Image (cartoon, rainbow, N blue to C red):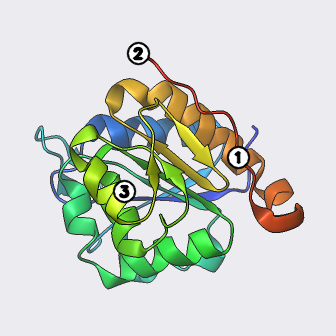
Amino acid sequence: MELQGKRVAVLVGRDFEESEAIYPIYRLKEAGAEVLVAGPDAEPLEGKHGYPLQVDHAFEDLDAGDLDGVVLPGGYGPDHVRRSKAALKLVKALFDEGKLVAAICHAGWVLASAGVLRGREATSFSSIKDDVEAAGARWRDAEVVVDGNLVTSRHPGDLPAFMRAVLAGLGEGEARKSSAGGRRRRAVTSRR
């Protein structure tokens, strides 16, 4: 299994987009990673379509030093996640340590609030394009944008490309940290 020994947090808030949380959880597990599902507290949360998800950890219980990356699903959940100082601190610490930070759809709000978008290329759901740009990113209309340790996608239809980039980013994490400058851009793919 390619990600054996890797630990990845998936941060969810009330009314998260189920497909953008559950698909990454199972793809990461399938690749051998340990997945830690975290929320405001260690209580089950319901997604925007009514599907419950077991939450095992509170945001404040996680430490960036114990993780290899984070996945941020979209839906309405990011608006709740971004209100947590602990969640924002975790995302910023992982980003600053050169570890994988991956966000899809409305999760760009969390990236903006964590202050990790300035000078980066990113994408998001089109309705928050202005927010992503106001946070300092160059917004691209692409199924996945990879800028160093930052991976972003637009919506559930981009999940296959998003997860290929996430899995590749986790597999390349050690090489990326040891490379000069610690930042590498990969091709951006787009569907029109």
**Number of dots carrying numbers:** 3
Depth check, mark 1 against mark 3: the one in front is 3
Residue bearing mark 1: 185
What residue appears at the point 86 percent right and 55 percent down from the top-left corner? 175
Instruction: Report how far apart the C-alphas of labels 2 and 1 lie in the structure.
Output: 22 Å
Where does residue 102 sit, x and y in percent of width and height? Answer: 50, 52
Residue bearing mark 3: 133
Going by the numbered disc 1, the residue's amino acid type is Arg
Q: Earlier in the sequence, mark 2 or mark 3?
A: 3
Where does residue 99 sit, x and y in percent of width and height? Answer: 65, 64
Of the 4 image quadrants, the one containing the C terminus is top left
Q: Is residue 5 left or right of residue 134?
A: right
Circle 2 packing at 10 Å, graded few (<14), some (14-19), many (20+), is few
Residue bearing mark 2: 192
Q: Are marks 2 and 3 in contact (CB under 8 Å)?
A: no
Task: Say if 11 sits above or below 41 in the image.
Answer: above
Which of the two residues, 134 or 82, is positioned nearer the viewer here? 134
Going by the numbered disc 3, the residue's amino acid type is Glu
> In the figure, residue 66 lies in which quadrant?
bottom right
What residue appears at the point 67 percent right and 54 percent down from the top-left corner? 148
Q: Earlier in the sequence, mark 1 or mark 3?
A: 3
Mark 3 residue element: helix
Q: Are marks 1 and 3 in contact (CB under 8 Å)?
A: no
